[in-house]
Amino acid sequence: DAASVLIGLNQLWALGLTLPQLCEIGLGLGADVPFFIHAQHAWVEGIGEHITALPSGSVAAGTCVLVVKPAQGIATADIFRAKDLKRDTPKTSVEDFIAAGLGFGHNDLQPVAKRICPELGEALRLTNRALNRSSQHPLAARMTGSGSAVFAFTEGAIPELAELPRGWQARLCRLL
């Protein structure tokens, strides 16, 4: 929403701000805002300020993503304060991501977030079960960013989800 507002105000008020200027403002609002200002598939590093556009075709347009969001949220600061947060994962690259495809990587924040927010673990289990996947499957559900939503790639039909607990949300999205 913040990215859309910045882009809209830049146009509405004819400010003439460049993409890097909008991204600098956006970064002050949230780490994901510059990514949404760029509005394309990208590899993002740092706290959201280093953006590398992915080559055309490296992510198939129309790929579906199931997103499940429990009612409980997680404070990012609580995750980063945790003593048991893994902080020594070897650095990877956009080339590694492109070579591995959608099953790439993991989220080092997820184990700590699951401890802080038990609903996250339940969201992961429910999503994997709906997609008939185990947590070891290369396309298993994972936590988004610092949570508490989880996502999983799917073939396009919304899988049968057990009735979601009160306050939870599920959405099927398509990559543009």
Image (cartoon, rainbow, N blue to C red):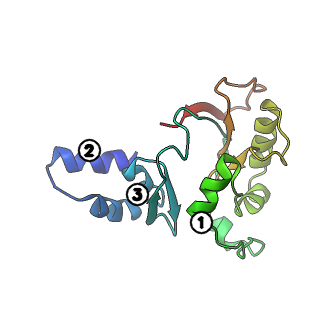
Of all residues, the one furthest to the left in this rendering is 14
Per the image, the residue denoted by label 1 is 93
What type is the residue that disc 2 sits on?
Gly
What type is the residue that disc 1 sits on?
Ser
N-terminal label among 1 and 2: 2
Displayed quadrant of residue 113: bottom right
Image quadrant occupied by the N terminus: top left
In front: label 1 or label 3: 1
Per the image, the residue denoted by label 2 is 8
On the picture, is 90 further left or further right than 51? right
x and y percent of residue 67 in the render? Answer: 63, 38
Per the image, the residue denoted by label 3 is 34
Q: Are marks 1 and 2 in contact (CB under 8 Å)?
A: no
Q: In percent of the image, x 66 and y 23: which residue is there?
A: 157
**What's the CA distance linking mark 1 and mark 3?**
19 Å
**What's the CA distance linking mark 2 and mark 3?**
14 Å
Examine the rendered structure and indicate whether residue 58 appears above or below residue 163.
Answer: below
* SS state under label 3: helix
Displayed quadrant of residue 19: bottom left
What type is the residue that disc 3 sits on?
Pro
Task: Out of 62 and 149, give the one closest to the viewer.
Answer: 62
On the picture, is 66 further left or further right than 31? right
x and y percent of residue 130 in the render? Answer: 78, 30
x and y percent of residue 34 in the render? Answer: 40, 57
